Image (cartoon, rainbow, N blue to C red):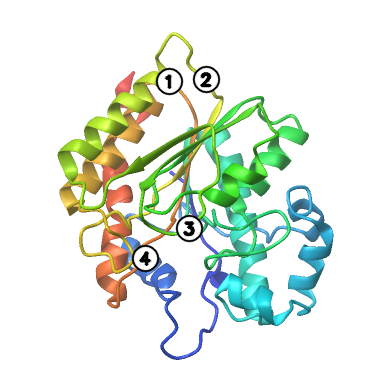
Amino acid sequence: MPIVYHPAYVAPMPNGHRFPMGKFGALKRYLEAQDLLTFANLVEPEPATAEIVAQAHERGYVDAVLEGRLMPEQVRRLGLPATPEVARRSLAANGGTLRSAELALEHGLACNLAGGSHHAFREFGSGFCVFNDVAVATRHLLQTGRIERTLIVDLDVHQGDGTARMLADEPRAFTLSMHCRTNFPTRKQTGDRDIPLEPGLGDRDYLATLDRTLDELLNGAEAFKPDLVFYNAGVDPHYSDRLGRLALSDGGILARERMILARCRALGIPLVCVVGGGYDNDMDTLAARHALLHHAIAELPSRASAR
């Protein structure tokens, strides 16, 4: 299973910054220590070009990011420093999600060790999200004819507001967001399927809701029938996440990952996974939580043995 990573995924942050930038490098190191990431399955992507990003974002906004011309109010809304390193990181992460999607179409499954920047809108960044990598990859793959229909399954604890807004006019892309009702963003957008969850919701009810929803979207009488699924595997629904408000355990997140993988594998739908949100002061603890997805992947039978 290809795993996509670029050294630029970790950009310098001011001391004490709320965004856990170090988790991306910590996740890579954890996967290497667990023999889940080796030279054989590591892929370094080409950063996305400004032209590809501008297929989804306004070109003026893209240029302002890359040229360091964001206004102070734009930087405040973004929540990240407007540095050249953050701009390079954003291009690398977008290139990583696009490359992961291409690899998923080839191999059936691929993971980007960044991505899930679902609060970025067409004309501005928000909530630690500069460019919306899933929307960018979706627009590019649809425009180039690589895919015909895609489903975005966003299980970050925060609504995928930017993704919903950026793909609202695209009937070939279906956005599902299952998020905490009372969490950021305050002003929610309207996606194709929004499922606001009550604060404190735990494993059993969360997994039952997800199972029912996936059944409707993938197996029901009016199933969407995508030829690619993007999965935002945010771990901020965890009970100890400092920005979460839901109450999933490690076991609940692992069961969630198994459910997504099993559904896509059973239907033969290529799946591309992005990291999404997760907030903890201990980067090793946070990396292990994000790696639950990779442990679930390691449990899958190979296609050869499955046959």
Pointer 3: what residue? 185
N-term-proximal mark, 4 vs 2: 4
Q: Give the residue displayed 21% in from the left and 64% down from the top.
A: 240
The answer for how far apart the CA atoms under marks 1 and 4 are is 31 Å
Q: Nearer the viewer, mark 3 or mark 4?
A: 3
Q: Are marks 1 and 2 in contact (CB under 8 Å)?
A: yes
Judge whether 63 appears above or below 164 on screen: below
Q: Nearer the viewer, mark 1 or mark 4?
A: 1
Q: Nearer the viewer, mark 1 or mark 3?
A: 3
Look at label 3 and name its amino acid. Pro
Residue 35 in sight here: no
N-term-proximal mark, 2 vs 3: 3
Instruction: Judge from the rendering whether residue 118 lies leftward or rightward of residue 237; answer left or right.
Output: right
Pointer 2: what residue? 224
Judge whether 213 appears above or below 59 on screen: above
Residue 131 in sight here: yes
Look at label 4 and name its amino acid. Leu
The answer for how far apart the CA atoms under marks 1 and 2 are is 6 Å
| Residue 221: x %, y % from top left | 44, 8
Q: Nearer the viewer, mark 2 or mark 3?
A: 3
Pointer 4: what residue? 27
Look at label 1 and name its amino acid. Leu
N-term-proximal mark, 1 vs 2: 1
Look at label 2 and name its amino acid. Phe
Pointer 1: what residue? 218
Q: Give the residue displayed 27% in from the left and 76% down from the top.
A: 282
